[in-house]
Amino acid sequence: MRKWVGLLAVIFILGPAFLVPAKAQKRRSLPPRLLTAKLVYFENQTGFAAVGGDALRELERWGRFQLVGSRDQAELLFVLSSKVESEALANPTEDRRFGPDLSFHFRYRPANAYLTVDDAVTGERLWSGSHAWGGLLTGFNSAGRRLVHRLRKQVER
């Protein structure tokens, strides 16, 4: 019995030390271009100005990036949308008009918001995330802000 208690104590004490490399690995998994770029162009494709404005305010509050007025000046492209961009890029020739749409959508707003961060020069996808659109408890326009905040947490780790 004492051996088991001793073993559990050692695991409890040393266990968190083994989790530190996993956090460092997440930091290393972000592309270097995402960590070094400063100039970004933000595009709101959701159709909801309040959602894009909320995301822009969060980007400005973060202060890591400088927003520019055109894609030509930018190093990174932040695109906030209500459509899954990766599916369209994976199968560009597939015609999606003729299949059953099995997803659930709200009548007045999309179910999810998507934020993608692309390299403006190469077009490479550097980061992407999705978040439920939000509602009464989390805020109807909070999805873009929450996505920018999630990116911020990953970059600052």
Image: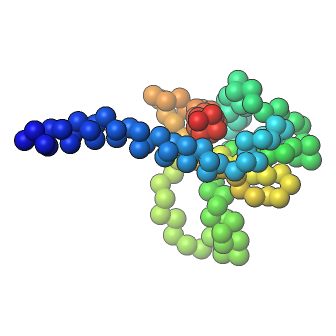
Where residue 69 appears, as percent x and y from the top left, is 89, 37
Between 124 and 23, the one lying in front of the other is 23
**Horizontal relation, residue 49 to residue 131: left or right:** right
Between 75 and 115, the one lying in front of the other is 75
Q: Residue at x 71, y 56 (%)?
A: 125
**Horizontal relation, residue 120 to residue 118: left or right:** right
Where residue 47 appears, as percent x and y from the top left, is 70, 43
Between 136 and 35, the one lying in front of the other is 35
Q: Residue at x 82, y 37 (%)?
A: 38
Q: Residue at x 59, y 39 (%)?
A: 154
Q: Is residue 62 above or below residue 43?
A: above
Where residue 59 appears, as percent x and y from the top left, is 71, 31
Residue 153 appears in the figure: yes
Residue at the right extreme? 72
Where residue 1 appears, as percent x and y from the top left, is 7, 41
Q: Is residue 71 above or below residue 51?
A: below
Between 22 and 73, the one lying in front of the other is 22
Residue 43 appears in the figure: no
Residue 108 figure quarter: top right
Residue 144 figure quarter: top right
Q: Residue at x 14, y 43 (%)?
A: 4
Give the position of the C terminus as an image quadrant.
top right
Residue at the top extreme? 61
Colour scheme in use: rainbow
**Horizontal relation, residue 91 to residue 70: left or right:** left
Number of marks in picture: 0
